[in-house]
Amino acid sequence: QLLFGCLLFATTIATLIPREKLFSDSNNAEGVALSPDGKFLGFITPDANKIRNVYTWRISDRQKRQVTFEKGDVMGFVWTGVPDIIIFSADPNGNENTMLFKKNISEMACPLKRKIISNKPGVQALIVANNKSGRFVLIGMNDVTPAYHNVYKFDLITNKLLLVFNNTRFAVQMIHADNDMRIRIAEAQQSDGTKTYFRVSSKANPLNLTSSTNDWEEYASVKPEDIAITGLVGCDTTNENIYWIWGESIDLGQLIITPLHNITKRTVLHNATQAELERGSFQFHPKDRSLLMFSEYRHYPKIVAFNDTIRKDLQYLQNFRPNDHLQIIDMSDDMRTWLVTYLSSENPHDIIIYHRDSMSTELLFNRTPDLKGYRGLITKIGFDFAARDGLIIQSYLSLPPDVPLKNTTNVPATDRSFAEQKMIPTKPQKMVVVVHGGPESRDHYNFEPTITLLTSRGYAVMQVNFRGSSGFGKRLTNAGYGEWSKKMHYDLLDAVDFAVSKGIANRSATAIMGASYGGYATLVGLTFSPDAFACGIDVFGPSNLVSLLDSVPAYWTEGRKDLVKMIGANTDTEKGRKDLISKSPFFIADRVKKPLMIIQGANDARVKEAESEQFVDALKNHSIPVTYVLYPDEGHGIRRGPNVLASLGFIEKFFHGCLRGDYQPFTSGQYNESAIVKSDGFAPAVQQKQQ
């Protein structure tokens, strides 16, 4: 499970790519989705007031129109089964008390009109199920008990909410509905570490479920060592069989199908071979709900056609851009119109319509038009290396564009495979190790503006899927349990050693940066191994694992259990607290000897402001300089446009002072951001490269 999010900030020809183009406030389109009837695209982009709102694009005449008019940023939206009806979400304070609204996009006479589904203070509302085929969606709200979400059936026509599950037992993310949006399965972690899947009892009223044991019966039990790669995918067309990613007695998992009434009758449909099956990649037919395709994803995504009816379509689309990586975004209900894009070094955000009847494509627009003409927007190279204990670690290396490279004739024989992949520059580079959050998450081959910003400034970037990451089998994930500040940290050090040994990186000019868990890894790097990195940037990372566990949100009932499992200790015993202290950078803050910058959102519900404040105070108590930037209107992620631009300005200015890479001029306040520089420990003279 993704407990901590990833860094939300996201070549050049001969000049730097301006921050304003990489993180454009005017042209970027996010969350692009196709309406069920195939007539409209919907997406989120800043309006004239630089507030992110929902827009539609009519495919027939390419007419663009704003359809929501919120005064605060819209987080996301979905199409529904009722024509012209969307549901959109907002979190104005960044505290994860998400609000939901219904909007009829055809009501042009009253553009400000929308129906409030939930905007109660202190309540988190989210969509539990939406089959885009009918007048109902399932909504979860922790409106009675903060730790648990009740589930309501929301009528898109009458706007009525009907309570269908009075829930005091299951985390909302662990509640699963079938294709007809009937709740069928729920899961919970047990005290012995196993995970139990329950199905709704035949005695229960499906429209008036409770948490009573009479309403639920045990369906399946998953051993602790198998949990990392086991999960429910969805129901088949009959709603009586369930697709699973199953992890018993296999490292990468397999796709199976089982009857809802008997988990022991398992049919294996596909065995993963290179990496885990990507959970978010499963595509079902919009109407009959037959399984169409999914992906395996090691270095790069590989689509597996499960249904012969779409095999020719996939072949056509892959041949259309054979050097790029196909991504299916959406499909119309009748399957005649597909929305696709490609992971591409030069055009990573082309939005393309595939007309299935004629087997033809049509370029609609590019999500980031300001980047047209810049080369090497994705320079990631996927590779493997062996950690000190022999565990194979998958990673990505991104080099600055146009950096001179060694060929296979002027490297040792042991390095030729890396030279063939164009990984070895003629001289070692300044490098930033960017650590992903989670930590049960992973880095992918994709366009990340932050990575492109760093390579544009002349830095190599290493992204390591260290042990504890997901996506590469349960052995790798399970190897991280209990290894915070230990083997998970050693994997990052080994990645640096690898890069230095191959001539990729200059050890004395290597920095570390990350958000959430990645921020924690940064603090570990500067305290547990104070000479390993030249400097570091921590973005809302926990510094004290005791206070982190003591302050998790109420609705993290299951999440806290996972967090305890990953860290390997709890606060409920003296031994556990000692172990947590031994893994916490806060208690050895006096070891910091290299430049450090900390960025924090004041409304962060996961990693509270106190996590950064206490570490900054500890540094000051030892007369250790630190730069500390606080955003009073952000949470667990920097989202507001001006704040994103300012954060990247702070980051590249800091790295310039430490590593002497290229630098675009930046001064605090130039974007009218909310940032408060509470401590400015380093103020180097900055040499600015003109654009």
Image (tube, rainbow, N blue to C red):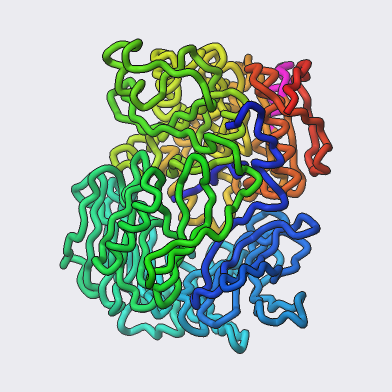
Image position, residue 476 (x, y; %): 32, 37
- Which residue: 72% across, 33% down? 649
- Which residue: 73% across, 19% down? 625
Vertically, is 478 above or below 331? Answer: above
Image position, residue 235 (x, y; %): 32, 71
Q: Nearer the viewer, residue 540 or 556?
A: 540
Q: Is residue 166 visible?
A: no
Image position, residue 172 (x, y; %): 49, 65
Vertically, is 623 above or below 399? Answer: above
Position of 219 with respect to 48 (left or right) is left
Q: Quadrant of the image for the C terminus?
A: top right
Q: Nearer the viewer, residue 546 or 219?
A: 219
Position of 518 with respect to 642 (left or right) is left
Image position, residue 504 (x, y; %): 45, 17
**Secondary structure that dominates the magenta span:** helix
Position of 354 with respect to 637 (left or right) is left
- Which residue: 42% across, 54% down? 327
| Residue 319 on the magenta segment | no
Vertically, is 443 above or below 621? Answer: below
- Toward the bottom, the furthest residue is 158
| Residue 621 on the magenta segment | yes
Which region shows up in magenta? 614-626
- Which residue: 66% across, 28% down? 15
